[in-house]
Image (cartoon, rainbow, N blue to C red):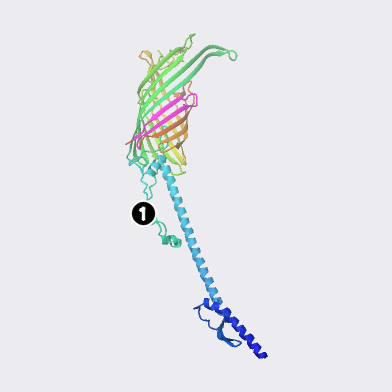
Amino acid sequence: MQRRAWRFVWSAGCAGLVTLGAPVAAQQAGAPAAPAGATTVATTATTTGTTAAPTTATIPAAPATQASAPSGDDLRKKVIEQGERIEAMRSQIGAQMEQLDAMKRALATQEADYQALRHAVGMDELDKQRAGSISAGGPGASALPMPAAQAVAANAPSPDQAGQPGQAGPQQPVGEAPKPDTRPPEVAPIFQQPGVLTPKGKFILEPAYQFEYSSVDRVALVGYTVIPAILIGLIDARQVKTTTQIGWLTTRYGITNRLEVELRVPYVYEHQDTISREIFTGAATDNAFGSSGHGLGDIEATARYQINVGGPDKAFYVGWLRVKSATGKDPFQVTTDCIQRCVENVINEVDLSATGTGLPLEQPTGTGFWSIQPGVTWLYPTDPVVFFGNLSYLYNVPRDNVSRKILLGGTEELGKIKEGNIADVSIGMGLSLNEKASISIGYDQSFVGVTKQNGQTVPGSVKTVLGTLLIGGSWRLNDKRTLNFTLGVGVTRDTPDATVTVRVPMMF
């Protein structure tokens, strides 16, 4: 009895397993066979009076842990491969850094070339070169080769090379670099000596006009004082107004790129009015005396040579030598208002008093002396301005057997005359506003020595300091013509009050 009970329990359990496994077997129809190593169990469910169909159950085997886990050799191999990849990436990064440094150096070189070109040819020429409108034969003109589109495309890296920077070859420059211009930068001229030389084989014709006005008050006390502010004698008060107009024609020719010669021919018109009271008399009214003169002035010749080759933040030096002739009518050739003599003197107890004021009846157009003037001009370009200046010394050649004309056709012997030499120094700065306009400002100061007659200082002759504040502007009309304007304002007593100069240099 007990045995039949256990058989019933076993049959019921098997039937339950079959009942639960049938739906799963229906859903997994066509499932793969049991893996190797699985154990198949066949059971037969038996109920009371009924025998169940045999059922097969598959029990998977335990996984083989040792076969699926990676071995130590595999891990070591993977670590080595990752190390190789890291080294390759490091090499690529190093190559990219080297290429970047090379590009930085190339950019710095191009920037230096750009600055040199900018200071060498000036802002106006540089802007024209950027626009591609350089005129042949213009001052400082030089072609800037630009890379063509085909050349840029040919030198561009391919997509494969772009992805492999470590294998990229060195970049080659496109075109040919422009030749550096060794000429000093152009600025608005305010001094007589230009800083930019004429190019080789070029010819410059420069007409110019200058207007100068000065007014000087002179007071002479003839007598003696008893106490301060009380004068016994005469007061000679004079007011001298001088107007000078000069038109000149200057020609310059460039022998080489660093040597030029210049010839200047002036025509002078001068008028002078003197308002005074007659000395040594008790006149109560003012007398006005006027005189004028015009004619050819003193012709000048100058040679200039560029000493060095400057550049950005490096000064240019131009040495020059100027020779001034005595082609104009000098002060000793014009007739004065003196009847017998103009200089009071006593010889052998005989009083040779002056018989006139000594004022000329006609104004001279020249100095009457040959002069030699060496000097040096310097220019220092530093973006965005250009500093410049001059340093010179003028030597007046003495004259012997000089005589002065007086009224009634007479002459007065003066002997040897030596005019005072002149030391001149000037400094200024120029600024380019755009491709056509530029301005300059500067200061010029001259130290004039005394005049001597027969080795003795002429009475009343003293050392003089002339100071002038100069403001100038330049406007480029076209590639070969420029309009220059200069205003000079006297800052010392003996300097002309105002000087206006207009020049139009034309290149051929």
Name the residue rendered at 43%, 23% in the picture: 213
Residue most toward the front? 49
Residue 80 falls left or right of residue 242: right
Name the residue rendered at 51%, 16% in the picture: 220
Q: Is residue 353 magenta?
A: no
Name the residue rendered at 49%, 14% in the picture: 236
Specify start and end residues of the magenta stretch as a single range: 479-506
Label 1 sits on residue:
151
Where is residue 170 shown, x and y percent of the image? 42, 58
Q: Quick check: can you spot residue 259?
A: yes
Q: Secondary structure at mark 1?
A: helix
Corner quadrant of residue 263 = top left
Where is residue 315 shown, x and y percent of the image? 45, 42
Is residue 427 or residue 505 the one in the foreground?
A: 505
Residue 72 falls left or right of residue 154: right
Corner quadrant of residue 249 = top left
Corner quadrant of residue 134 = top left
